[in-house]
Amino acid sequence: MSRAGKQVEWSGAEMISSEMMGRLAEALLSSSPSAIFFTVAALAAGVVAAYLYAPAWGLRRLPGPAAYPLIGHLPLLSKHGPEVFSILAERYGPIYRFQMGRQPLVVVASPELCREVGIKKFKSIGNRSIPSPVRCSTIHRKGLFFTKGSRWQSMRSVLTSIYQPSHLASLIPDIQPYIKRAGGLLRHGEEITFSDLSLKLFTDTIGQVAFGVDFGLTKDKDAAAATVPPSSASSSSPPQAHPPAAAADFIQEHFYATTQLKMDLSGSLSIILGMLVPLLQEPARRLLLCVPGSADRRMEDTNMALRRMLDGIVAERTTQAESDRGKKNFLSVLLNAKESTEDLRKLLAPDYVSALTYEHLLAGSATTSFTMSSLVYLVAAHPEVEQRLLREIDDFGHKDRVPSAEELHNSFPYLEQVLKETMRFFTVSPLIAREAGEDVEVGGYVLPKGTWLWMAPGVLAKDPKQFPDPHVFRPERFDPESEECKKRHPYAFIPFGLGPRVCIGQKFSVQQLKLVAIHLYRHYIFRHSSKMETPLEFQFSIVVNFTHGVKLQVIERNI
Ligand code: HEM
């Protein structure tokens, strides 16, 4: 039976016609007080039920598990983590219904359907849905990620110039000193929480690339007291362009803000309400802001503090002459672009500049750091992969020779495979959100305007049809000459998304990840610490993270 065209037009308000209301009123007037009470209670329950179920009604023909009232499928997400989407795809097929509290999603879990959503139907599905944790936070909403329509298009085309290969190549000398500095913190035999160090390193590099600021998170404690030489691209020490105390405060607020964007039932009360009863999210948030110590108050304070600091940095840079700002960091490029035309001046109002710059930090640190930690964790458990990787890195040349962008691309084919296999094995962004801007047909179902469609790269990455033995870590499956790679669907591996809204930082993050891996493996190898849980545990906030971190022992190489 064809499922196309089976959309049902329905809204809670239409259910109760004016004729019915008239009869009801008549009946009520002639009834006893208890009958009136029960009728009103039943009516109220009906209205509540209509409010809760209305969004799911238009999608009821899609397959999917039965949902609990109010909380939908959130208990399944809590129980299985992001793995739940693979379990459900196996059971219900490549397109199914999932309910985040009251909000229904259509999960799309085949390469062909992802192509349909991300590329072919981009005109109808060009924006992202805004999840409950982000709804009340302007600092998160005004970046590229959540802006919509023509504003997104204009901002994206300005930002694209920043990610041109020549610009990325020019960043290598700025980034390398930070990598060297972080590597210098490692000591032979020491047990470390590698994921913490990794997050600090990528926050430091992004601080430099986004603001031209040294956050100093990977500064050796002893060295921190020493004077750092002033900014210079050719210097072997990272430049210093902002008072470290303010930077440290900023980062503390940033880490807090990032980890609080929970997608399950562990977020603040207003975020949870936003998932269950969106109507109540904003009033509840306002109420909770008056309660000292509440998670909402703490988040609001954090967001305000972040905004103040960002606005301060933006205002300070705005008043600087173009020549003093520097040309490379993201913020300066934005401010320089803003001064070039009247249209850009309007488009890049100060609050958008702050949000875009902050987004750079947000999008670039947690994702890249998770991927780096996953790579080191996986390589530590696969000696044959480690041997091959070390050989390739050692063969490149002397330890101090920093590869150029071209060499990173051409001279490290096995590292490229290890990186891709890492991202397949532990996908940091297992779901990619979109929202239908109009009624649209996907996979044979007509989905009403406003439907949340989430592509599932995490499910694709574990599909045995595309990746035989999906639970085996085997970088060679990404060898472009291998049969497995040649046979694979072109959209089976999409850790950075696809189509016009694909990750804008993709090449930048790959460049950084390769630079870090090369530097680390020239000096060290790693082994799992006995303090680390097996298997690794993950938590699902705006991206996936490690619950307890990746704990490793450092072994210095004697070469
Ligand atoms: C391993 C690292 C990273 C991963 C896995 C990753 C993944 C993603 C994914 C899956 C998307 C959604 C794409 C889509 O909707 O089709 C995205 C979007 C985005 N990413 Fe990344 N990302 C990474 C690093 C970065 C970095 C380093 C930056 C910036 C410095 C960045 C900035 C962005 C932005 C701004 C968007 C929104 C693009 C738009 O809507 O036009 N990402 N990323």
Image (cartoon, grey):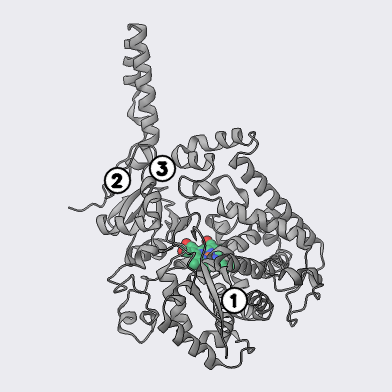
What type is the residue that disc 3 sits on?
Gly
Out of 95 and 13, give the one closest to the viewer: 95
Residue position for label 1: 164
The span from disc 1 to disc 2 (Cα, nearest Å) is: 43 Å
Q: Is residue 347 above or below residue 385?
A: above
Mark 2 nearby-residue class (10 Å; few <14, some 14–19, many ≥20): some
Q: Secondary structure at mark 1?
A: loop
Label disc, if present, on residue 174 of the rendered structure? none
Quadrant of the rendering where the C terminus is positioned:
bottom right
What type is the residue that disc 2 sits on?
Gln
Mark 1 nearby-residue class (10 Å; few <14, some 14–19, many ≥20): few
Q: Considering only order in the chain, which callout, 2 or 1, is on the residue closer to the N terminus?
A: 2
Q: Considering only order in the chain, which callout, 3 or 2, is on the residue closer to the N terminus?
A: 2
Q: Secondary structure at mark 3?
A: loop
Out of 133 and 529, give the one closest to the viewer: 529
Label disc, if present, on residue 7 of the rendered structure? 2
The span from disc 2 to disc 3 (Cα, nearest Å) is: 22 Å
Residue at the spot x=53%, y=73% of the render? 553
Q: Are marks 1 and 3 in contact (CB under 8 Å)?
A: no
Q: Are marks 1 and 2 in contact (CB under 8 Å)?
A: no
Residue at the spot x=49%, y=69% of the render? 529
Residue at the spot x=29%, y=45% of the render? 7
Label 1 vs label 3, nearer the camera: 3
Quarter of the image where one finds residue 110: bottom left
Q: Considering only order in the chain, which callout, 3 or 1, is on the residue closer to the N terminus?
A: 3
Pinpoint residue 176: horizontal percent, then vertical percent.
65, 79
Is residue 532 visible to us here?
Answer: yes
Q: Secondary structure at mark 2?
A: loop
What type is the residue that disc 1 sits on?
Gln
Out of 469 and 327, give the one closest to the viewer: 469
Q: Is residue 371 above or below residue 236?
A: above
Farthest left residue in view: 1
